[in-house]
Image: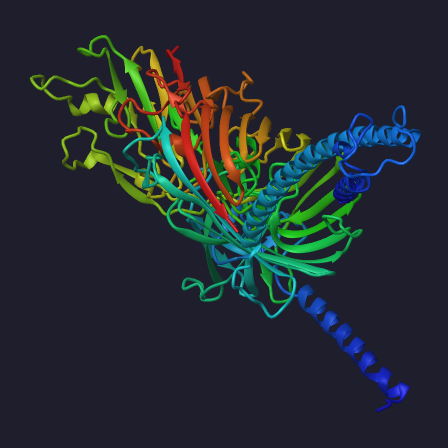
């Protein structure tokens, strides 16, 4: 059957129009909505809040709505700190609060909660804050700005924070850090001629105290002695129970045995990870007077990478790869 | 044939000559009077009448007759001698002809046997399809790990895997279906193995449109494909597992391109001696440890090879190429964790005391990040074939890369070291094949971190390099072959008594049986 040319063209044109409309509709739909970013690249993360790109600016000309009160349990935080609560009240016109860290590349929008039971006028807000492990140490302002239904931003209210060093305090610290959720263990062998037969003793997760073993006939160490001794603080990702710390330290708070010391890294398990890259360092980081953020003094360090082959071992006291040996200054 | 005809004509001619000669002898015997019937000295027979005076001697006619008889007798002798010669020659020719016939018959029988064998080999399996151009191939490689130095009758408790490597295993069991038509092609291949327990997985699945090349050309002029296919980089990756005599690829290849297959789109060009293949792929090969065949970031890897493949004479074939890769790797972030309490038995009495509790705070998540990576490589191959005698093949490859190790010592510049990992690898191999027997050797080395000796950031171990010398002997064709390989491995995976990195004894002897169709 012969189709008139005009009728034959019509379906083609119709399809083109429909396709264009579909594309335009899809494009329009893609333009709307909020930023889907997880915000993990920001120093500050706020649970159950909307991510907003860009630093929260301090607009000096703004007047309303205002943030009236801010409460925080602790203003000293450390990089990686999790679930630090903050709360406060805002003007009755406010519908949400913007929270951001000074110098950060993002901030967060938190809706207001219930009426403040004290004033019965203001709105309350609360948030659970987390800080990236990469957050730079030092003093830093936590900024708050209220926002009303019309999108008007109020003035900035700040809470001064101190981002503390994660390095432990001690006359001698031996620290192991690594980058994946594997179970690595820090082993340190301390030379001590008083130890019978071997002339050394090991400090590791099965013997966390840096004290030479006593003969069974000798009285045990007193609580004062054990408190003053160096020790392994904890065993991270032990048995692949992931705690996310990925660091272990042996800290000598006061007296430091003369050594020399052998520092080893044992890969107990990669816990399903393809590899683990580690860094082990010995440094001094004595308590400053008065307490302040300070940089530790490095004695020696080494880097390494563990693979499947490193997990094949007895994982006893003398296991692991030798990272370095040193004598304390 | 002409020779045979000539020989037949000669025989016929000789027979004719013999016959004629024999007739001549007969004629001479019939025509000539017997020598004893009369002669110059013979008395006249009794009763015969004498006319005229008796002749003083034989008449002229008698003399002529005697002369003629003498001549005839000489000719007869000569003809008899010729006939005897001809008869001997004829017998000799008959003997030669008989021997030739016998030999030809034997050759025919041998050819028939070979033909039957070839026909049996070519006999199609009873598989049919509704479409033309469909092919079905497959092969099995079964290994016997006869001996390995690092093998232990123990379990790696971290991974719950056995440390024993002296075992039987199915290294590869492949089944491949192909479609090849004028303008479209496709492949679907499944792999089964027991390397880490019985496994079946898809390994090759590609759909292509193509522009055929000149008639008889082995490859299409132009082909565009999409699917799961081999990464077009270098020589070794693209070499068939079925054809390769060495049991496995080099350490560098296994580290930089683990599994060889990746998902993406590819364009191939084959014009005369020129070869080009370029692909856009996920960048996460099937053998990668982190995200095999998936892609955790939107960025794709661009990879390709340009090369030449051509015979330079009847006996010499050369191939060479340059490859490159530019892509984006992925550093995985870590999740947030909750606060917890840990008990450390400080005084090792097995009982809890209050000062043995340690609080472990929760920690925030860290973000994932992308990083750039690249690789380039050079490959060359030369094959010299002396027909029916020996074929010698020498080939080698060089790899240089940055942040590309995805299996051995996985590269990640965002680790504690905070720098790029620069990899380098190479190998050279030689194979000598005579009929179905092959012997060969390959030396390969791989260093996953060329900067590990940098004293500013001391690494443990300071040298991560691997090297392997593989000696191989095989008999058979890819359709039925036995391969014996000895690998001398050197590495830095061992630990000495002080805990320092040392070579871990890891030499291995493996026997492989392979059959295919």
Measured as percent of width and height from the top left, residue B400 is found at 64, 29
Q: Nearest the camera: B115 or A256? A: B115
Total labels drawn: 0
Quadrant of the rendering where the N terminus of chain B is positioned: top right
Measured as percent of width and height from the top left, residue B399 is found at 63, 30
Q: Nearest the camera: B504 or B320? A: B320
Residue B100 in the image: above or below residue B298: above
> Residue lying farthest bottom?
A1
Residue B411 visible in the displayed image: no
When asked about the image quadrant of residue A271, the answer is top left
> Residue lying farthest left?
A217
Residue A56 in the image: above or below residue A320: below
Name the residue: 67% across, 33% down.
Answer: B387
Q: How has the structure been colored for display? A: rainbow
Q: Nearest the camera: A207 or A65? A: A207
Measured as percent of width and height from the top left, residue B291 is found at 51, 47
Q: Nearest the camera: B96 or A13? A: B96
Measured as percent of width and height from the top left, residue A272 is found at 40, 43
Residue B302 visible in the displayed image: yes
């Amino acid at each position: 059957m012969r189709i008139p040319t005009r009728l034959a063209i019509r379906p083609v044109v119709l399809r083109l129009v429909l396709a264009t409309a579909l594309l335009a509709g899809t494009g329009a739909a893609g333009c709307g909505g909020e930023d889907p970013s997880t915000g993990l690249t920001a120093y500050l993360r706020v649970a159950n809040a909307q991510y907003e790109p860009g630093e929260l600016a301090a607009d000096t000309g703004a007047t309303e709505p205002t943030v009236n009160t801010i409460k925080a349990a602790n203003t000293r935080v450390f990089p990686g700190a999790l679930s630090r609560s903050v709360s406060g009240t805002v003007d009755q016109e406010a519908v949400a609060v913007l929270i951001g860290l000074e110098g950060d590349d993002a901030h967060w929008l938190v809706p207001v909660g219930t009426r403040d039971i004290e004033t019965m006028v203001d709105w309350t807000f609360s948030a659970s804050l987390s800080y990236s492990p990469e957050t730079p140490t030092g003093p830093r302002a936590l900024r708050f700005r209220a926002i009303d239904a019309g999108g008007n931003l109020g003035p900035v209210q700040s809470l001064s924070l101190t981002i503390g060093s994660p390095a432990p305090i001690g006359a001698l610290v031996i620290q192991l850090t690594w980058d994946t959720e594997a179970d690595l263990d820090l082993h340190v062998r301390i030379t001590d001629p008083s130890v019978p037969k071997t002339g050394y003793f090991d400090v590791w997760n099965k013997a966390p105290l840096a004290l030479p073993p006593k003969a069974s006939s000798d009285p045990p160490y007193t609580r004062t002695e054990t408190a003053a001794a160096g020790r392994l603080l904890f065993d991270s990702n032990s048995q692949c129970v992931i705690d996310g710390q990925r660091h272990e330290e042996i800290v000598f708070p006061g007296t430091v045995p003369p050594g020399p010391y052998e520092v080893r890294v044992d890969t107990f398990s990669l816990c399903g990870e393809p590899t683990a890259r580690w860094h082990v360092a010995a440094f001094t980081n004595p308590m400053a007077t008065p307490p302040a953020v300070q940089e530790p003094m490095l004695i020696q360090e080494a880097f390494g990478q563990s693979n499947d082959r490193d997990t094949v071992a007895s994982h006893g006291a003398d296991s692991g790869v030798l990272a370095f040996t040193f004598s304390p200054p | 044939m002409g020779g045979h005809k000539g020989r037949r004509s000669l025989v016929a001619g000789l027979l004719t000559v013999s016959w004629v000669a024999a007739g001549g002898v007969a004629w001479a015997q019939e025509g000539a009077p017997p020598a004893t019937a009369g002669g110059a000295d013979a008395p006249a027979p009794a009763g015969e009448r004498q006319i005229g005076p008796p002749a003083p001697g034989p008449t002229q006619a008698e003399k002529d007759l005697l002369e003629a008889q003498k001549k005839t007798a000489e000719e007869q002798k000569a003809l008899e001698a010729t006939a005897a010669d001809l008869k001997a020659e004829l017998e000799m020719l008959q003997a030669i002809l008989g021997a030739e016939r016998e030999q030809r018959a034997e050759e025919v029988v041998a050819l028939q046997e070979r033909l039957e064998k070839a026909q049996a080999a070519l006999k199609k399996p009873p598989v049919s399809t509704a479409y033309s151009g469909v092919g079905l191939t497959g092969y099995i490689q079964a290994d016997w790990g006869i001996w390995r130095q690092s093998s232990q009758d123990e379990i790696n408790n971290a991974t719950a895997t056995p440390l024993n490597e002296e075992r039987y295993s199915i290294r590869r069991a492949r089944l491949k279906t192909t479609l090849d038509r004028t303008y479209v092609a496709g492949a679907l291949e499944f792999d089964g193995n027991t390397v880490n327990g019985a496994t079946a997985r898809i390994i090759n699945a590609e759909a292509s449109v193509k522009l055929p090349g000149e008639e008889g050309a082995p490859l299409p002029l132009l082909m565009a494909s999409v699917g799961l296919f081999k990464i077009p980089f270098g020589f070794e990756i693209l070499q068939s597992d079925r054809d390769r005599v060495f049991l496995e690829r080099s350490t560098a290849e296994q580290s930089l391109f683990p599994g060889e297959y990746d998902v993406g789109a590819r364009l191939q060009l084959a014009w005369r001696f020129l070869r080009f293949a370029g692909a856009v792929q996920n960048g996460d090969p099937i053998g990668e440890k982190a995200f095999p065949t998936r892609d955790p970031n939107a960025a794709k890897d661009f990879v390709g090879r340009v090369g030449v493949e051509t015979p330079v004479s009847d006996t010499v074939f050369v191939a060479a190429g340059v490859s490159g890769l530019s892509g984006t790797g992925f550093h995985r972030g870590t999740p947030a964790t909750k606060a917890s309490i840990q008990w450390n038995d400080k005084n090792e009495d097995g009982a809890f005391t209050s000062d043995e509790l340690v609080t472990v705070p929760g920690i925030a998540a860290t973000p994932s990040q992308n990083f750039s990576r690249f690789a380039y490589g050079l490959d060359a191959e030369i094959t010299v074939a002396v027909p029916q005698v020996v074929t010698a093949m020498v080939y080698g490859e060089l790899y240089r890369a940055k942040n590309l190790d995805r299996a051995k010592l996985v590269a990640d510049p965002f680790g504690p070291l905070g720098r790029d990992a620069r990899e380098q690898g190479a190998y050279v191999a030689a194979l000598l094949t005579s009929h179905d027997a092959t012997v060969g050797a390959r030396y390969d080395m791989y260093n996953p971190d060329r900067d590990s000796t940098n004293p500013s950031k001391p690494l443990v171990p300071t040298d991560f390099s691997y090297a392997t010398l593989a000696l191989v002997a095989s008999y058979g064709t890819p359709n039925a072959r036995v391969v014996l390989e000895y690998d001398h491995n050197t590495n830095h995976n061992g630990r000495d008594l002080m805990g320092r990195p040392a070579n871990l004894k890891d030499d291995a002897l493996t026997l492989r049986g392979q059959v295919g169709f």
